Image (cartoon, rainbow, N blue to C red):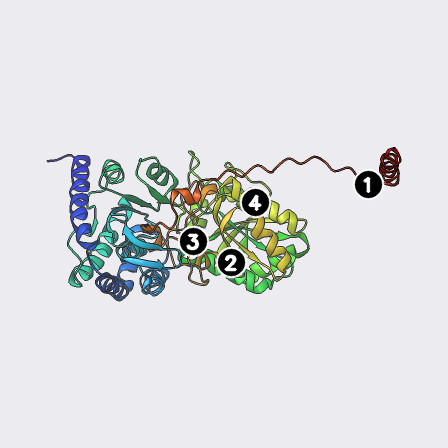
Amino acid sequence: MLDKDLQSIQEARTLIQQAKQAQKKLAEMSQLEIDRIVKAMADAAYSNRERLAKLAAEETGFGLWKDKIVKNSFASVGVYESIKDMKTVGVLNENKTENIVEVAVPVGVISALVPSTNPTSTVIYKALIALKAGNAIVFSPHPGALNCILEATKVIREAAEQAGCPQGAIAAMTVPSLQGTETLMKHKDVSLILATGGSPMVKAAYSSGTPAIGVGPGNGPAFIDQSASIPKAVKRIIESKTFDNGTICASEQSVVVEECKKDEVIKEFEKQGAYFLSSEESAKLEKFIMRANGSMNPAIVGKSVQHIADLAGLTVPTQTKVLIAHETQVGMKVPYSREKLAPILAFYVEKDWMKAMDRCIEILMNEGAGHTMTVHSEREEVIRHFQLNVPVSRLLVNTPGTLGGIGATTNLAPALTLGCGAIGKGSTSDNVSPLNLMNIRRVAYGFKELEDIRPTETPKAEVQEPQKELNNDLIEQIVQEVLSKLTTK
């Protein structure tokens, strides 16, 4: 019997080779043919949204299947609607004035890492944007979500092939392993890696030698300004943090408030179902947020409040929606200040909005730089200061972080891969779309010759003797000289 790692490596090589051949055929297709395939994929994914959501929740134990239906719908219909009219094949633009023609060029074969937190929705989304740009895609599933990822891949692959997609253009590894994934990332015929997953995997993608688009950890704070509607702000934060039990990385991780609104905000959170931990309870739960190596504890990821409370030996009200801990510190060894993909929030109180902004920056620079944060405010001058100073790629105003960041409640490009830019050690700050998965060939016609651009020598100006300035003394001298000459004659 073949060793599992060897099987995985060989499977990766085979799928890449098949994808390479399929991509050559995709590159010859018209925009109409590509769009027909993408539409069929989106329709099939949407039709299977509930079944795939239940499979994902059952297999991973993360999140809520009803919320996963929303994510699958968003990844199919939401993403499709945003890209359906996008020009991605052939000539994109022809500027007759400047004599420049822009042509779309697919990158080729894409390897895509799929996390266990958002497995089926990520497959749907990445396949749609890859095929829309004329690329083939091979998925590397998280082992903890293998079956639902394979099923999601099967659904969209069959629909795509029925619509004319070449076989091999959409595939997933059935024997995932670190060695197989490494092969998938480093293979010479893979042109780009779409990396969504834990920080070590994303770092490995960037270190592979293959161009990569990855995401950093989300650790977005939510600032509630004194001018905000407190009930609305709290509602948005709770809805966002509890959506699929907090498994989307754009979800809020901390709440920062001004001292003058502290009591009002706490009261509103409690009114809407939040439970503030005592110092003793906070210390108990803190031990379960991070593992000894500093990584997030998978035992709390995507779990319900009750499950987390039982794990930590806490007794909380039955209807509690989110657990909140008072915090004053920020650091890699301060669990509440870090990313928590679960219904747990840190709560910071600052003197004023300027101190609050400083705290948000401190949180983000510790973890989550370049990702997302939210501001709830009606003061434009406050919002302006945040947008000019906070190190994020998405500053969301008066909207839930989870749904606003992915473009569901904002007009950002609908996406489940959110770039973190250079400050987040990423290659883009975009919500990743088909435009990030193709190159643009520019055809430029000449309109100058060498002699037109060579500097010419400026002729030297003739040197003239400086003229003497006329004044009364000089005039008198000239007159005397003239008279003297006349007298002599």
Quick check: 414 above or below 110?
A: below
Looking at the rendered structure, the secondary structure element under dot 2 is helix
Which of marks 1 and 4 precedes in the sequence? 4
Q: How many numbered marks are there? A: 4
- Label 2 sits on residue: 237
Q: Residue furthest left?
A: 1
- Label 4 sits on residue: 361
**Percent x, y for residue 39?**
26, 65
Q: How busy is the neighbourhood of tag 2: few (under 14 within 10 Å), some, or many (20 plus)?
A: many
Q: Is residue 50 left or right of residue 173?
A: right
Amino acid at the residue labelled 4: Ile
Q: How busy is the neighbourhood of tag 3: few (under 14 within 10 Å), some, or many (20 plus)?
A: many
Which of marks 1 and 2 precedes in the sequence? 2
Whether label 2 touches label 3, CB < 8 Å: no
311 and 334: which one is in front? 334
Q: How busy is the neighbourhood of tag 4: few (under 14 within 10 Å), some, or many (20 plus)?
A: many
Residue 104 appears in which quarter of the rendering?
A: bottom left
Amino acid at the residue labelled 3: Gly
Q: Which label is found at residue 174?
A: none
